[in-house]
Image (tube, rainbow, N blue to C red):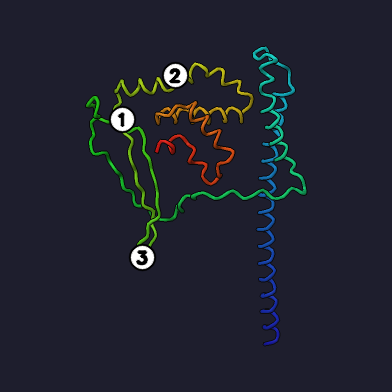
Amino acid sequence: MAWQIAQLELRDSELARRDGELAKLDESLAHRDATIKALELKNQKLTHGLAYYRRIRLGAKTEAMSAEQLHLFEDDLAEDIAAVEAELSPPADAPPKPRPKAGRQPLPDHLPRETHVHEPDSCPCGQCGAHLVKIGEDVTEKLNIIPARFFVERHVYPTRLPIDNPVLFAGIENAIRPIAPGKKIWLFAGSERAGKRAAAIQSLFATAKLNDIEPAAWLKDTLEKLHTWPNSRIDELLPFRQKA
């Protein structure tokens, strides 16, 4: 009888071991299926983007753009198509891409947070005397520690402006006026990537103006420094950093 009990226990142990192996196998298969699905979605997205760029480059010419205008975007289209094709079919012997330097990652959500709201010293506007209205806030987080206790300390700086200050809104209107007349022209930037590049350049010019820096002079100085400037200090070329 004892021998039979020992055999049953041995069989149960073997069955439990096999069940564990099957569970691990199911988990591995589920992970593989999820990876395959993600790769298929990425492939579909890149294929669609490549077809879009080819349609722009090789499709019928529209009446909205002349042959000279289309010629202006051929270089950008060629670069964009080459970039998408490289992502779709990278060469087998291509060296691995260098891993970008990781920036500051968001602090973990599970850490408790203590919020400190920093209100302005004065509520009325210094120019017109109207009450300020909260239009946004600047939130920064830093990791703090009490012995054997981690928590995130939140600092909130509300952005308040008088809701009916004509001087303020006149300034905002003047800032966007140069861009607004060309809003239809921006539709013909050549490609989505070219449009993003144009938006980035406009943002840099606007930042230079807000910091009382002549945009053309800043751009000339930046382009002259860029080819020898170390990549680790590239942010020092931004307009607001030069103002500081």
Residue sitting farthest toward the top: 63
Give the farthest residue toward the right.
92
Q: Where is residue 130 in the image (x, y as percent from the top left)?
A: 24, 26
Q: Which residue is drawn at 69% across and 27% down?
A: 75
Q: Badges 1 and 3: C-beta atoms under 8 Å apart?
A: no
Label located before the other in sequence (1 or 3): 3
- The tag earlier along the polypeptide, 3 or 2, is 3
Q: Residue 161 — which label?
A: 1
Picture residue at 67% right of the left edge, 71% below the top: 17
Badge 1 or badge 2: first in the primary sequence:
1
Tag 2: amino acid: Arg
Q: In this view, does 70 lie above or below 38?
A: above
Q: Quick one: which residue is furthest to the bottom in this view?
A: 2
Helix, strand or loop at disc 1? strand
Considering only vertical position in the picture, is 123 above or below 149? above
Quadrant position of the N terminus in the picture: bottom right
Q: Where is residue 84 in the image (x, y as percent from the top left)?
A: 69, 36
Is the C terminus in the top left, top right, bottom left or bottom right quadrant?
top left
Q: Mark 2 points at which residue?
A: 177
**Residue 225 % position (x, y):** 54, 37
Q: Would residue 52 be visible to someone looking at this image?
A: no
Amino acid type of the residue tagged 1 in the rendering: Leu
Instruction: Give the alpha-carbon distance from disc 1 to disc 3, as whole Å.
Output: 41 Å
**Type of amino acid under label 3:** Pro
Task: Report the residue marked by disc 3.
Answer: 147
SS label for mark 3: loop
